[in-house]
Amino acid sequence: MQLRFRQVHLDFHTSPDIPGIGAEFDAAEFAATLEKASVNSITSFARCHHGWLYYDSKAHPERVHPNLSNKNLLPEQIAACHAKDIRVPIYTTVQWDDYTAERHPEWLMIEEDGRQSGTKPFEPGFYRVLDVFHPGYRQFLFDHVKDLFACVPEVDGLFFDIVGPRVSFAPHWIAAMDAAGLNPQDASDRQRFATQVIQDWQAEMTAFVRTLSPDCTIFYNSGHVGTRHRGESESYSHWELESLPSGGWGYLHFPQAQRYARTLGLPCLGMTGKFHTSWGDFHSFKNPAALEFECFHMLALTAQCSIGDQLHPSGKIDAATYDLIGGVYGQVKAKEPWCVGATPVTDVALLTSEEFTEYSAHSGRNLAHIHGGIRMLQELGIQFDIIDSQSDWMRYKLLILPDEIPFDTRLSSKLDAFVYNGGTVIASYKSGLGSDGQFVTGELGVKAVGDAPFSPDFIVPGNGIGDNLPKTGHVMYQKALEVMPSNGGSVLCWAEAPYFNRTWRHFCSHAHTPSSGERKYPAVVASGAGIYFAHPIFRQYQLNAPLWVKTMLKDAIAMLLPRPVLSVKGPSSLLATLNKQEAENRHIVHLLHYIPERRGQAFDVIEDVIPVHNIEVTVRLGQPVSTVTLVPEGESLPFTTEGGAVKFTVPTVNGHAMMEVQ
């Protein structure tokens, strides 16, 4: 299946207290505006979070929005769009529905303290959480989908929103857990059961939808795609990665989700928003440079694009919004031929700890050590995927275990096989530790002693790690794990201790105590498999980005991966990716230069496009190259070939540049 590249995700969560819903909708204007903005797919709405329907329902006429002027709003949108070859997946809500919550409180999920889950009395919002495990609500959802197909015959796809494994303490949940041999008082058992409930419902719903349509797209949205989705993928036709950087996700979330999701074998669609902040931010506009970056970043990471919008209650499409979207999608349309069917070319895998993290609605979004890893690897221009314990590790040359990857004998055996087949490893802090606090694998060349006795302490560069740094102590703000060399490990860098830890009895100056110069315990250890850092360097970089930490990681990567598939000489604010179009027998280099800034207190923004010039690029493909061309401009670039490496210079990167290596 090939997704469209230029989608809009159109919300329409509309209060019953607003009159004239859809009164100004004009089907011809609607479709023409989308066409002018180069939109070729739009997710439109059947049922919203307020619980209202926007089509002439036969099964549930009481749910049609009471002030809907045109009861065929959704079918008319579909017909007008199809006439211009614009695809229209259909949106419906699942776990939020204010109409249903008001009329069927018995269908709501229950918190541990006995209250209804979600929005409290007298608070604005439709966030009370409905229970797909309740037989009454479960049946309604199937009836609703059947009604939708009956009333809207052309269904391109279904987007089920707010679908996550939430725990309920309702009596029927507790009874079902008892029957399944699970302990309702055990948090891990409750989460295991909640995950099974949502996976079973998705599988059942997908099977039902397939009786109505063999090929419509199906997606269940929870605001994040992560490791739990591996076990649910058969219920999906593709992934849609909701990730509004200004809406609580941040600029590190999309690369986290996409670099993982693209390894799961389904097409991926990135999703940002046109809003300055987040969903429902009416009459706001994202900075054009930010919207460009977010969409071009999707292309660079082999995803298609989706931009979120919300239709005004009147039904009139907003011309200014689609001028903004069209300004970006016109460029995406021109770049598309070099993105169709593209797959990433990577050397490195960053192993995520998300599967080992207790689930919550946003638990997978903000793991500091994963985000620190993404930051450093992107800033260093490393080509990498994010993987989990079940992924195929053999595809990669270098595996990174950031800070907190727990190990057992299965993972130890998998790592042994990876190293035996020529792979190398960078690990840090407690990655590789088993439940007994000792390293399960001997590949890292260290044995755990315990938490380091001093913090902060100080790494002295040496032996290839930090060679360009001053040969003096560099403070490490996060406490290390004290280790000793084992299984042939050798110390590359040592940690110096302060005179004493800072306490109320012993302190010096404003912050930490300076180094005593006394070498205490290993900070960086080399083994036959790779390099181990005793400090949580990835979390440290996410917290306050010490350049010396990134420099030491850079040197470790260079020692283990001396000939990366892509090398770029440019500022660390430059993002570089390498993709392959197998059918066209060509590779595409993407260079992006947009700089997010924290101008307000709430989130990062991008306002200015700052060109960079004369960027040197080296690509190591192991095969002859005939041409290097700047696309879509069609400008040939001179190149040289040396030792199997192709080298060329990009004169200017004005936001985004793509080079075809044929």
Image (cartoon, rainbow, N blue to C red):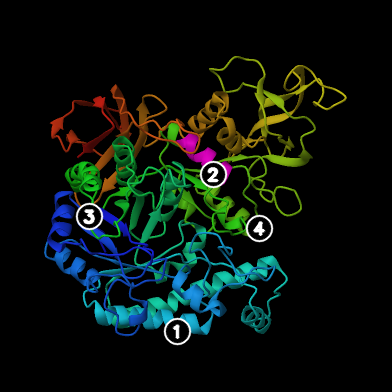
User: Closer to us: mark 2 or mark 3?
Assistant: 3
Q: Residue at x 73, y 71 (%)?
A: 185
Residue 370, numbered label = 2
Please state which amino acid type lies under the numbered disc 4: Thr
Residue 18, placed above or below residue 110: above
Which of the 4 quarters of the picture holds residue 572? Answer: top left
Quadrant assignment for the N terminus: bottom left
Per the image, the residue denoted by label 3 is 317
User: Closer to us: mark 4 or mark 1?
Assistant: 1
Q: Secondary structure at mark 4?
A: helix
Decide: few, some or many residues near mark 3? Use Cα within 10 Å; few <14, some 14-19, many ≥20: many
> Distance of mark 1 from mark 2, alpha carbons?
40 Å
Instruction: Tell me which numbered mark, 4 or 1, is placed earlier along the sequence.
Output: 1
Q: Secondary structure at mark 3?
A: loop
Per the image, the residue denoted by label 1 is 139
Residue 653, numbered label = none
> Distance of mark 2 from mark 3, alpha carbons?
40 Å
> Distance of mark 3 from mark 1, alpha carbons?
35 Å
* Residue extent of the magenta highlight: 367-377
Q: Nearer the viewer, residue 550 or 244?
A: 244
Residue 409, numbered label = 4
Quadrant assignment for the C terminus: top left
Position of 29 with respect to 320 (left or right) is left
Residue 394, placed above or below residue 483: below
Q: Position of residue 617 (x, y in %)?
A: 31, 28
Position of 275 with respect to 156 (left or right) is right
Position of 249 with respect to 508 (left or right) is left
User: Closer to us: mark 4 or mark 3?
Assistant: 3
Q: Secondary structure at mark 2?
A: helix
Q: Main secondary structure of the magenta part?
A: helix
Please state which amino acid type lies under the numbered disc 2: Ile
User: Closer to us: mark 3 or mark 1?
Assistant: 3
